[in-house]
Image (tube, rainbow, N blue to C red):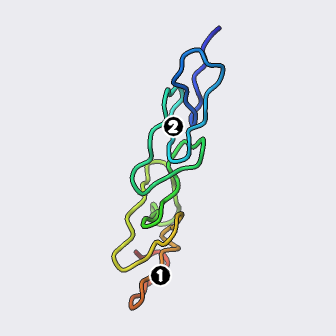
Amino acid sequence: TDCVDCEAGKAQSVIGQASCAPCEAGKYSDETGQNECDACEDGESSSSGSTTCDLCLEGHYFPRVDGGTYTTGNQHCTECPEFAKCPRDGITLDTIESVEGSYRFSSTSD
């Protein structure tokens, strides 16, 4: 029987298995044919079967790229600024909260 490469988002470390397993939450595989999934960097996570780490954890936010869109490719989560709050997972630049006694010029300023 011919072996088939695991698709991105899945891996298999045991030779001769009939299928590949999805990467567990907090890990990803962005290439085909992987025998293990890579761990997300500090402050980042992913859902099961992910090809990228596309979720920022509490205390971090996902910045905009090129002045407009959010991308998940090689973009990484950024630590929440000193005068702001990122109180839950999934915060983006648009949803950062200002701490008491400070304000933001706009939803796109950090």
Is residue 26 positioned above or below 5 on the image? Answer: below
Residue at horizontal 54 percent and vertical 50 percent from the top: 46
Local secondary structure at mark 1: loop
- The residue lying furthest to the bottom in this view is 101
Total marks shown come to 2
Residue in the picture at 54% in, 29% down? 32
The circle on residue 106 is: 1
Which residue lies at the image location 47% right of the left edge and 62% below the top edge?
A: 62
Q: Label 2's element?
A: loop
Q: Position of residue 49 (x, y in %)?
A: 60, 41
Between circles 2 and 1, the one closer to the viewer is 2
Q: Nearer the viewer, residue 48 or 96?
A: 48
Instruction: Give me the residue at 61% from left, 27% from top.
Output: 20
Query: Could you classify mark 2 by the number of other residues whose Cα lies within 10 Å: few (under 14), some (14-19), or many (20 or more)?
Result: many
- Point out the tag, 2 or 1, that comes first from the N-terminus: 2
As drawn, the residue found furthest toward the front would be 14
Quarter holding the C terminus is bottom left
Give the quadrant of residue 61. bottom left
* Rendered-image quadrant of the N terminus: top right
Q: Which of 5 and 19 lies nearest the eye of the viewer?
A: 19
Q: Which mark is residue 29?
A: 2
- Where residue 7 appears, as percent x and y from the top left, is 59, 30
Q: Amino acid at mark 2?
A: Ser
